Image: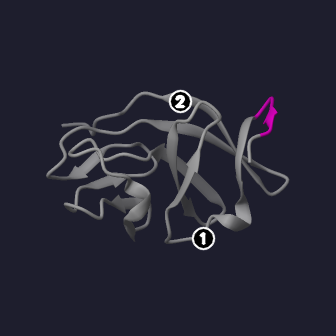
Amino acid sequence: MSAHSEAGVVVARLAEVAEGFPLAVTLPDGTPVCLVRDGDAVHAVEDRCPHRDFPLSGGDVVAPCVLECPWHGARFDARTGACLAGPATDAIGTWSVVIADGAVYLGARRAPVEPAA
């Protein structure tokens, strides 16, 4: 699924993004993205753990907006991409998300944000 509009590119229907279960989608350019639902909001992050380059979409949402890598347990804030727990140390990129007419649109990619020290 990939239709374009002023809101961005459609990557899923909101009904397809189950709360508590990451969803893998692919952008038209082949970029893998992981969607995480938080109530009526959806967050989009890179679908790769910077520790060993494994897909995060195979992991779990272990707390609201906290995505855990299934291989080594690194944790990321799905809202900001910040690394919350190792073994990974780098943040992951995120995308702006708009929900409209039951569709999930991804907008501009945002750079990884590290948590404040």
| Label annotation for residue 109 | 2
| Label annotation for residue 117 | none
Secondary structure at badge 1 equals loop
Q: What quarter of the picture does the C terminus occupy? A: top left
Query: Which residue, as the protein is rendered here, is positioned at the far left?
Result: 87
Q: Nearer the viewer, residue 105 or 28?
A: 28
- Image location (x, y in percent) of residue 51: 21, 45
First in sequence, mark 1 or 2: give its number. Answer: 1
**Image: magenta residue range:** 3-7
Identify the main secondary structure in magenta. loop
Amino acid type, label 2 = Arg
Which residue is painted at 60% across and 55% down in the image? Answer: 42
Label 1: which residue?
A: 18
- Image location (x, y in percent) of residue 53: 29, 44
The number of numbered badges drawn on the structure is 2
Q: Is residue 102 above or below residue 47?
A: below
At label 2, counting other C-alpha atoms closer than 10 Å, the crowd grade (few under 14, some 14-19, many 20 or more) is some
Query: Which residue, as the protein is rendered here, is positioned at the far right?
Result: 101
Question: Per the image, is 85 magenta?
Answer: no
Question: In the shown orientation, is residue 63 left or right of residue 53?
Answer: right
- Image location (x, y in percent) of residue 105: 71, 43
At label 1, counting other C-alpha atoms closer than 10 Å, the crowd grade (few under 14, some 14-19, many 20 or more) is some
Task: Say how the picture is coloured.
Answer: one colour
Q: Nearer the viewer, residue 5 or 32?
A: 32
Which residue is painted at 28% across and 35% down in the image? Answer: 114
Q: Nearer the viewer, residue 117 or 46?
A: 46
Question: In the shown orientation, is residue 3 left or right of residue 85?
Answer: right
* Whole-number angstrom distance, CA of label 1 to CA of label 2: 22 Å
Q: Is residue 88 above or below residue 61?
A: above
Amino acid type, label 1 = Ala
